[in-house]
Amino acid sequence: MFRKGYEIFVRKLDELEQGKEVQKEIRDAQTYERKNVKAIISSSLDKLPDGESLWVRGMLGQLLDEKPWKIKIISEV
Amino acid sequence: MAFKDLRQYISALEEHGELKRVKREVDWNLEIGAITRLVYEKGLPAPLFENIKGYPGYRIFGAPIGTFRKLAIALGLSPETSVKELIDIYLQRKDKLIKPVIMDKSQAPCKENIDIGDQVDLLKFPAPMLHDGDGGRYLCSWHINVTKDPDTGRVNWGCYRGMVASRNTLTGSISPAKDIGAHFQKYRAKKISMPFAIAIGPEPISGFIAGARVAATIYEAELAGALRQEPVELVKCETVDLEVPATSEIVIEGEVSLTETDWEGPFGEFVGYSATGRGRSPVWKVKAVTYRNNPILTVSNTGVPIDEYHLDVGLVRSAELYDKLRSEGIPVVAVNAPPEGVGFLVIVSVRGRAPNIAERVASCIWGTSQGTHAPFVMVLDEDVDVFDIWQVIHAMVTRCHPYRNIWKVERASAIPFMTFLNAHEREYRLGAKVCFDCTWPVDWDTIPPKISFNTNYPKEVRDHVLKNWKNYGFGKLA
């Protein structure tokens, strides 16, 4: 019924460095539990085929991209 | 007789057809929010959600006072009571303040369950995810925030949103412009954490009045007593030196940290937008939670009008500004801060024709705590019913000269919810104001005669037509 995967709040899309390991706070898109993770993020499904959905929101809560990005969590911090 | 608790009020709503029991399982994640939002936008009966996914034994009561009909019922009046009549009744009752009474803890329904210290778990309550994109789950959206001035001991009630941050913490912003903000600054200066209590689901008038902006010298519990015409029953908290309505459904007690912050927001706000965004807010550390058996969580889902915030404005601000204008000697006939104006618009009608009356009215309104953040003021002649928006629009476009009769003030205080301001102006609270003078100019010898049924036709003709209305083949006139 609702979105699956994770969500992240950013000021601008280009805050998200793609294809390299970054540390970010994300939240579960269904439970809204927050976690700090080390992860790799990509806007391209092809570049992160085994990643999970990452919905990218602006600071007003709006989706900055209608399609989910991808995130591969390496570890929780 | 005033309602003793929220449950009596819910029963009264049901008797009047203003309550809908939702027995089908609903999800706290957006589904309850979406239903409640639609209820506001269609003016429907308030939903009582009795089957919440993952939360057996808990209930949510949405849109508790989301229409003037429900507000009238909460005040013990006929649901047909007009807005004008509600304002008159508020003015009649408000000055007869009634002190609250203290109930013994053993008698207080809100003490049926007591969780203290490690037992506290805010996650046991079905805090809803109200709007898509909110910063989190909001447990506190229609409630009373209780704080005390550390110097004077004066207690304030407010209604400030609170988001669940963990099992024993909330986050919520504290505006310096609010009474709670003044308290917080004093605690900060003393380097003492600020004690707080949050009473969720009190009897309806206490909940309603907590959200209204009244003078800092007024104790809202006494004003609620005045409006109910009976004292509010309070009970002492378990871990802080504060009192809350004894029949509250859920009471959260604790201290606001002076040093710790957490993310809060964004949130769908009363202006009808997600306006202020995500930011760092103080951490509210919870020391105790007390609650009734099978507690009912009250939920106000703010957004486009009309919801509880707008009803507060529509009644209390209208009444208080009327009182203020009258006390200043302005020949005021009526004041309407219409709910659709989200608190930013005040419409005033005045008697007679006096030079610069519109400027006097606007200056007076902007000089009050009720009106300082109402950047739009319209002033009309007494023949216009300020509660009839169609009449107001007609008067504006026919009497307000688009150049001469619009008085703009370039610099004024603002609040960050004013979405017409740019980002810089919102951050630094740089606003503007405007007054629409929709009164006929005093130096005009001839005023165009108004053409309407009531103003144009001789009384004999009107009476004749009304008497024979059904005979013409029409139905009953509304």
Image: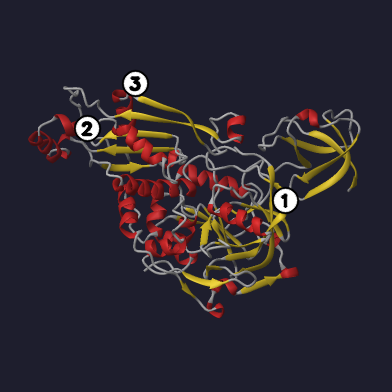
Please identify the residue farthest to the top as the structure is shown.
B403
Residue nearest the observer in this picture, B21 or B230: B230
Lower sequence index among marks 1 and 2: 1
Residue at screen point 55% across, 73% down: B109
Circle 1: element type = strand
Dot placed on the residue nearer the N-terminal end, 3 or 1: 1
Q: Residue at x 41, y 41 (%)?
A: B367
Left/right of residue B259 with respect to residue B475 in the rendered view: right
Q: Residues within 10 Å of mark 1 (few under 14, many from 20)?
A: some
Chain of the residue where label 1 is placed in the rendered structure: B
Instruction: State the residue position of label 3.
Output: B404
User: Quick check: B266 left or right of B453?
Assistant: right
Whether residue B355 is visible, yes or no, is yes
Say which of B222 and B5 sits in front.
B222
**Residue type at numbered disc 1:** Thr
Camera sees residue A1: no
Instruction: Give residue B132's position: percent from left, percent from top.
Output: 65, 41
Say which element carries label 3. Answer: loop
Residue placed at 53% from the left, 79% from the top?
B104
Inter-mark Cα distance, 1 to 2:
55 Å
**Which image quarter is the C terminus of chain B in?**
top left
Q: How many marks?
A: 3
- At x 46% / y 64%, what residue is drawn? B221
Q: Which mark is residue B391?
A: none
Q: Chain of mark 3?
A: B
| Residue at numbered disc 2 | B353
Q: Which residue is mark 1?
A: B261
**Dot 2, how many residues are within 10 Å of its Cα: few (below 14), some (14-19), or many (20+)?**
some
